[in-house]
């Protein structure tokens, strides 16, 4: 079972991942499936899972993630973003740019 802090972290991480998934202006079904799977593995509350599913169906972004919370575990965030980017077996230029932006937002040095 996740603690409230873990729950908040994973909700914020999902918000970021949805932005990353849309960074190439398309959402591959494998990316959507990966996001839903991650939300379930992380025991995201049902109302947040429904919110994510609605955003995926309608192509709407989730609110901006709380970067302060995500900065508490930057390597986990970066690793998860990389995994999502590789989900559709194609790393688009926009996704690479987004990865660089995520690194910067997390206060990490350029790769």
Image (cartoon, rainbow, N blue to C red):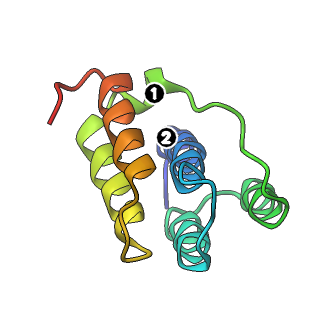
**Residue 73 visible in the shown view:** no
Q: Position of residue 89 (x, y in %)?
A: 36, 77
50 relative to 105 in the view: left or right: right
Give me the residue at 53% from left, 42% from top: 16
Q: For mark 2, what is the residue?
A: 9
Give me the residue at 50% from left, 70% from top: 41
Tell me: residue 9, above or below residue 87. Answer: above
Q: Position of residue 75 (x, y in %)?
A: 23, 42
User: Do the numbered discs 2 and 1 sit on residues whose CB atoms are within 8 Å?
Assistant: yes
Tell me: residue 96, above or below residue 32. Answer: above
Q: Quadrant of the C terminus?
A: top left
Tell me: residue 38, above or below residue 2. Answer: below
As drawn, which residue projects farthest toward the front? 93
Tell me: residue 37, above or below residue 77. Answer: below
Q: Nearer the viewer, residue 98 or 35?
A: 98
Is disc 1 surrounded by few (<14), some (14 to 19) or many (20+) residues within 10 Å? some
Label 1's element? helix
In which quadrant of the rendered view does residue 57 lie?
bottom right
Is disc 2 surrounded by few (<14), some (14 to 19) or many (20+) residues within 10 Å? many
Disc 2 versus disc 1: distance between alpha carbons?
Answer: 6 Å
Label 2's element? helix
Q: Nearer the viewer, residue 66 or 55?
A: 55
Give me the residue at 30% from left, 32% from top: 103
**Disc with the residue nearer the chain's start (2 vs 1):** 2
**Residue 88 visible in the shown view:** yes
104 relative to 2 in the view: left or right: left
9 relative to 47 in the view: left or right: left
Please count the marks in the image. 2
Give me the residue at 58% from left, 45% from top: 19
The tag on residue 69 is 1
Q: Nearer the viewer, residue 29 or 14?
A: 29
The tag on residue 1 is none
């Amino acid at each position: 079972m996740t603690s409230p802090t873990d729950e908040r972290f994973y909700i914020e991480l999902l918000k970021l991942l949805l932005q990353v998934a849309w960074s190439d202006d398309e959402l591959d079904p494998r990316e959507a499936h990966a996001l839903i799977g991650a939300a379930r593995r992380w025991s995201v509350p049902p109302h947040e899972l429904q919110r994510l599913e609605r955003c995926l169906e309608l192509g709407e972004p989730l609110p901006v993630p709380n970067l302060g919370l995500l900065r508490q575990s930057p390597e986990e965030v970066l690793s998860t973003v990389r995994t999502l980017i590789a989900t559709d077996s194609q790393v688009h230029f926009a996704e690479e740019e987004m990865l660089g932006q995520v690194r910067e937002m997390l206060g990490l040095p350029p790769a």
